[in-house]
Image (cartoon, rainbow, N blue to C red):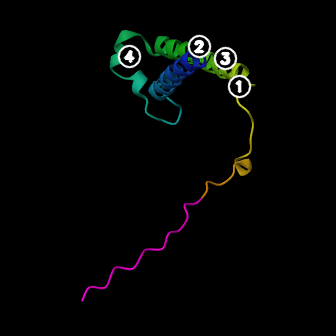
Amino acid sequence: MSTVLLVLHIFVTLALIGLVLVQRSEGGGLGIGSSGGMGSFMGGRGTANLLTRATAILATAFFVLSLLMAVLDRGAVERRSILDVPAPAAAPAVPASPAPATN
């Protein structure tokens, strides 16, 4: 179950990142969404409303999935400190035997 939620969360995250990058920001930004392709499909105001609503929906899905995964995996893992784990035993140092002398 958590694997399915994690994969869905990754897809929502990537879609949210892409949608935010496409939007035009006040400072210029990428501004891809307002020129040419999307502008011919809808007016500037319609495009902004569509992108704003889609961003709000994806952001809500992101937060809901994050909280759901946190609640589901809350008691699944035993909490331990990295300092409690014993260091791996080092291999004993075997001195190299000297090569036999050849005369």
In space, the residues marked 4 and 3 are separated at their CA atoms by 32 Å
Q: Is residue 71 magenta?
A: no
Depth order, front residue of 51/8: 8
Residue under label 4, please give it: 39
| Mark toward the viewer: 3 or 2 | 3
Circle 2 is placed at which residue position?
A: 57
Residue stretch in magenta: 90-103
* Residue under the point 26% across and 85% down: 102
Give the residue type at disc 3: Val
Task: Give amino acid for label 2.
Answer: Ile
Circles 4 and 3, Cβ within 8 Å, touching? The answer is: no
Q: Secondary structure at mark 4?
A: helix
Specify which label sits upstream in the sequence, 1 or 4. Answer: 4
- What type is the residue that disc 1 sits on? Ala
In magenta segment, residue 97: yes
Q: Which residue is mark 1?
A: 76
> Which comes before the other along the chain, label 2 or label 1?
2
Residue name at image x 61 percent, y 56 percent: 89
Q: Which residue is mark 3?
A: 64
Using the numbered discs, state the Cα–Cα distance from disc 1 to disc 4 in whole angstroms.
Answer: 49 Å
Q: Residues within 10 Å of mark 3 (few under 14, many from 20)?
A: few
